[in-house]
Amino acid sequence: MWAQNKINAAYSYGQFYKYPGGGAAACVAAVEKNFSIDVHQFVVIDWVGFVELIDAIGGIEITVPADISDYGTDSLDSFPDQTVKAGQQRMSGAQALGYSRVRVDGDLKRIERQQLVIQAVADKSVGLGLVSKLPETWDAYRHAIRTDIDTAQIPGFALLAKQMDLSRIETFSLGAAMYGSIAEDGQLVLLQDQDRVYDIIDRFMADPELRGEAPRIVFQYAAGEEALAKAALVHGGVFGIPPAFLSMEEVTGVDEPGIFDVTGKRYTAEKLRGLFDLRLIEKADDIPEGADVVVRLGAGTAFKSP
């Protein structure tokens, strides 16, 4: 059963109405329903655990983009004059919590601050070498966290984390796709422009290197092979190619199936070679105007998983 409310109400609803799996599972269900994103696992940490974990790593360093004050709530009580000054700031767990909570300039700005805090925690943890000690850290602080991640998976996550390049992590916000409104009960709410939301989600889910090349990819197919071309577009999307980059074109005859790198989008061409059983071909005739990479499908073209 679904009802209209702010999405952050999903947790409390799930807890109060005993949704299977509790508030966290209700949040997962709400995100999956509204944004068509598969959420595989969740982590819940309460305010006490949040403060404890940040204090345990010795606080965090954040470059605050602008002064922020809040005299109407207790959010910034841990800062002098209830104000966080712009510039480099060292924050304790209590201060990081306050900075994450303050919302005098709106929910979207609060999200940006929370993203800064998450990034700072990640940077500090890597700097202290905690990633390589993740199983031990997990054992010490698991009382502060609730998750559906199996304890046996933690060593595997530690190995993956060691391979991460934090400088390549990007953050996204749906703020640009939202507009203000008033609910029937008088609450101020944000509603979504569905097309713009999915455009942002597509960019978020995309392969970042391919997104940087911003290629126009055209799938060419012979008469009677439209279903194959449509399946190829879906296959590309599954592996991080935004739908906005993809199109299809029926051609008369497919002389030589293959992948054609027309304008030098080499990363894109190589990625497509990993997704389809086709070879790279340097020259081609009948290239659609404006195409960067052409994938010419044959009747027996097989799909691959990289």
Image: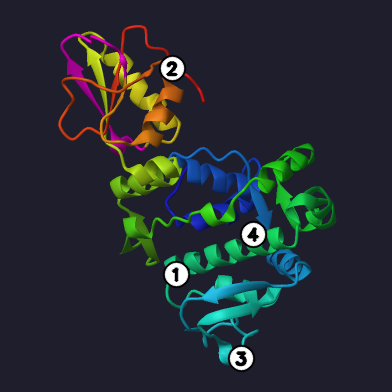
Q: Mark 2 — residue? A: 303
Judge the density around disc 4: few (<14), some (14-19), many (≥20) Cα neighbours within 10 Å: some
Residue 88 position within the rendered picture, expressed as x and y whole percent measured from the top left: 57, 79
Compared across the picture, whether 176 is left or right of 35 comes to left
What amino acid type is highlighted by mark number 3?
Answer: Pro
Q: Mark 1 — residue? A: 109
Q: Can residue 17 be spotted in the picture? A: no
Magenta range:
242-258
- Measure the C-alpha gap from mark 2 to mark 3: 60 Å
| Residue at the limit of the structure toward the front, as seen here | 282
Closer to the eye: label 2 or 3: 2
- Measure the C-alpha gap from mark 1 to mark 3: 21 Å
On whether residue 246 falls in the magenta region, the answer is yes
Q: Which sits in the foreground, 13 or 107?
A: 107
Compared across the picture, whether 194 is left or right of 254 comes to right
What amino acid type is highlighted by mark number 1?
Answer: Lys
Give the colouring mode of the picture.
rainbow
Q: Which sits in the foreground, 131 or 268?
A: 268
